[in-house]
Amino acid sequence: MLLPFLLLGGLAIPGGHAFFPNFWSKVLSFTWGSFTHQDLTEEAVLNVTLQILLDNKHPTRPPLHWEDFEGKTLTADAILGAYYGDEVSLRPFRAAMRQIVSANANMDFLNGTRNDPIRHFDSERVRQGNSLLLRAREDLLRNVRAKEYEGAREILGQILHSLQDFYSHTNWVELGHTGIHPDLATPGKDIDSIAEVSEQTCTDCSDVSCQNNIAAAIQKRHLLTSGYYGESPVKPQGKCSHGGPFDDSKERSARGGINKDTATALFSPHHFLHERAAQLALKASIKFLSELRGDVSDRDMMRLLGVSAFPALSFVLDTTGSMGEEITSARLQSRNIIQHQRMTLLDPDYYILVPFNDPSFGPVYKTSDPEEFLKALDSLHALGGGDEPEMCLSALQLALINTPPHSEIFVFTDASSKDAHLRSTVEALIQERKMKVSFLITEDPSRSSARSRREVLHPNRFDLYSDLASVSGGQIVFTNNQYISEVAKIITDSAYFDVVTLFHVQTLEGGIAHHVFLVDEFIHNVTLYINGDVRELRIHDPTGRKQNGRRQSFGKFTRVLLSDPLQVGNWTIYMKTVEPYSIHVQGRSSVDFLYYFGTPVNGSHPGLYQLNNQPVAGVPTILVVDAIGLPDSANLSDVSLTSRNGKTQTAELQIINQGGLFAAKISEIPTGEFSVGVRGQYGRGRGLKREAPQQLSASECILEMSSNLLVTPGTSHPVSVKITNYKESHCYSVTISNDVSKDSNTFRIHMEAGKREVKTTEIRVPNNLEQNTIVTVMVKADVCNSKSQTPCFTHLSLIVIGENETSTAPPPVCPQPSYLQFCPTSLVPSRCKDFQWRSMLLVTDIDGIKSVRVVNGSGTSSQYSDAGNDAIEYTSHCCDLQAELLLTNHKEAAWNCSLYAPTAALQAEHKAHYLLMIPLLLILGVSLGICYFQRKRRRSTGSGYSSPEDGEKD
């Protein structure tokens, strides 16, 4: 059983932060009744999604009413099902939700965020945390306006994590507030009433449950504070700790802690306030999303949250002289789809077109306006060319980058690929973005073409397209100009986003064969596609009865539509062919699944970190399945990983929550390509089966990229690449490229097993890029001189900004230091290490100090918060009498501050100044006293009384 394994193996122990931020904490939350970041984020997104759909009436369906959902548990299935009906899949919405939730949870795992007190509102970094939220909100809006929704979801998840941590990590709830903080993450507002560094904020607590351990003075004056966590920054005396078993600061005064992350005293000293903190965090999350909606259009907000019926209609078109019929067919199918769905909300979010020939490809036409898309199609003309091959993969790569994930791309061509070296990059993009690619080839590979040629063409020249279609779960269809308009109707068949693959095999040898596919009661509109010379075809339902369906044949392409309702059970296809063939069976269903791999993380924030990269071959991992549309009568029992050679590894799935999450322990990721499928049952033991369309390729390394995500035209932009080698020693050839220029950079690196290396390189940003252009940087690492091993791959999106958006303001200046400890005036050199000097900088910077580094000097620095400002202390022995500190804020502005050791003589000089002031103060006091008594005597010798007015003037 998985759950006992997790408990005994230590993987399920909750982390130190944030309402159990990881997946394993979700397992235990059902035992302890704790809210998680996932709970809060999902519920907030569902609330705002429902409000958007209530405000945007579906043109052909009954309107939604808030009363229909009031008092019920909101689910994606219920909300989108009520709005769209069963016409669409929940896959894009659930995938977007998963991205937001994972970005939220990964704040506790990533090196740059997990121990950052500002991002978690720890260590009294309250004002700095709010400033960071406001900056992140600006970045989020910039991504949305640039249509970079994937990057926006990452930022949104991080924002919601910090926002939710405010209520769990500060004393806002302890101060008695029943509502959310009105100024938190609100543009133009700041957080005030924050405890100063000199103020004691907590008292000692020796129990795991800490009642009333916040200092009475803090409560009385309604000052905000938060707990320190871990060793950095060091907790000053009398300050609060975060608390819990992973917080090393809890043993220093004031002992104990104040976090409200869980409902369990062992992990949260203020566990008794967990539910109140969680409810406020939920309200704050909904408020943030609702206010964000006010700054963007509802359509942009729906795309951000993944509310989409049809993400994209995407074409890659060969425009050489022989392609006139294909271009006409693409126009015809596009018009059919547009006309069919124009009166519904099922029209595509984007229309994408990438033309190519030789030697050119592109540009990318991407629009939300169907008329503009049709104009772009109409502007294409089949001209020139005639020679094989063409720049097909270059154009396909652009389409993969610009088409939303979980979409299908259709490639029309009659020529092989000239740029086959891009194969591994294209495959990696297909797998990472979960894309289908289908090829419509108007040339049978077994016959000659009307194209003019300078050489004899290889009969297997289209094998590359066949392999890419197989990897992506798409199709490759060979036809001719006579039938292309009919064959192209497979585009309309795939225009429904709830399509699931029931059976798929590519390039089988001819002869007599039979194939089996499973139909369950959730499947309808089943269609068979067969590409090859079929001499005999029989389809039998589970009872053995022959079913003819509606069969259409166009040359060597056969399409069979089975009539609903379908008999539940195993269907059998009997075939006789005389040459290699492929077969693809698909249907429509609301029941589907998403999945991801995760790796257990130990240390101060244990949990499950979601891997966004390729899985690593031969390494154990956890596979998480997110079931979509699974009814209460159904359950998933196991997951299978099937290698290309047919070897299958099966693992038992365990239910993690009632929201459709399952998990399995995978003992070893297969080497090379493999597919993922799930099985289960419904009703009285009936079988349920789904296959993920795309195959995966396991690699032996992981690539990670980091960079400032904003770039300006005409500049060289630094990019950092981290390579981690998990297997045997290798030489890697690393290539960095981008989608806006032909420039690339390649270097070699030799790595031992288990080692990691970080390299910094630069990309050149072209001068002619417009503001809000997305630049996609791709990194690929191939094993040197090897074509058999899967390369590692990752990519990163950058946004082009205008020159006026870059800050020209000078960095903050260094404040005047104050000195807390001095060196002796007469210092014997041999004893200089026996004495210390200590100084403090109180930095007022709205962006907050991100890091402090000693660049010159042998001392150490520490950093803490003082009433919302950053206090930096530097301590050194008296042998080293000066230092230089490099300060960096969260906008990456950096500046140096110089410090010089004070001596005891300087300290005495300061004291002497104070002593000289004492006589002056005494003289002033005596003079004021004499004046007072003289005035009083004059009044008493006057009229004998003083009027009230006189008294008041006194």
Image (spheres, rainbow, N blue to C red):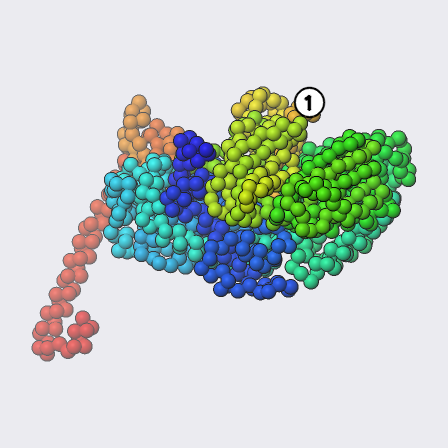
Residue 405 location, x and y as percent? 63, 45
- Residue occupying the point 60% across, 37% down: 677
In front here: 883 or 33? 33
The residue to which callout 1 is attached is: 785
In front here: 422 or 491? 491
Is 222 placed left or right of 8 in the picture? left
Residue 180 location, x and y as percent? 39, 57
The kind of residue tagged 1 is: Asn
> Quadrant of residue 99 in the image?
top right
Dot 1: within a 10 Å radius of its alpha carbon, few (fewer than 14), some, or many (20 or more) residues? few
Q: Is residue 423 above or below residue 554?
A: above
Q: How many labels does the image show?
A: 1
Q: In this view, does 718 lie above or below 373?
A: above
Residue 281 location, x and y as percent? 42, 53
In front here: 192 or 870? 192
In front here: 161 or 567? 567
- Residue occupying the point 29% across, 30% down: 835
Q: In this view, does 939 lie above or below 135?
A: below
- Residue occupying the point 91% across, 38% down: 452
Q: Is residue 928 above or below residue 632?
A: below
Dot 1: element: loop
Q: Can residue 212 be seen in this view?
A: yes
- Residue occupying the point 55% across, 27% down: 668
Is 864 placed left or right of 715 in the picture? left
> Quadrant of residue 912 in the image?
top left
Is 503 placed left or right of 186 in the picture? right
Q: Is residue 709 visible?
A: no
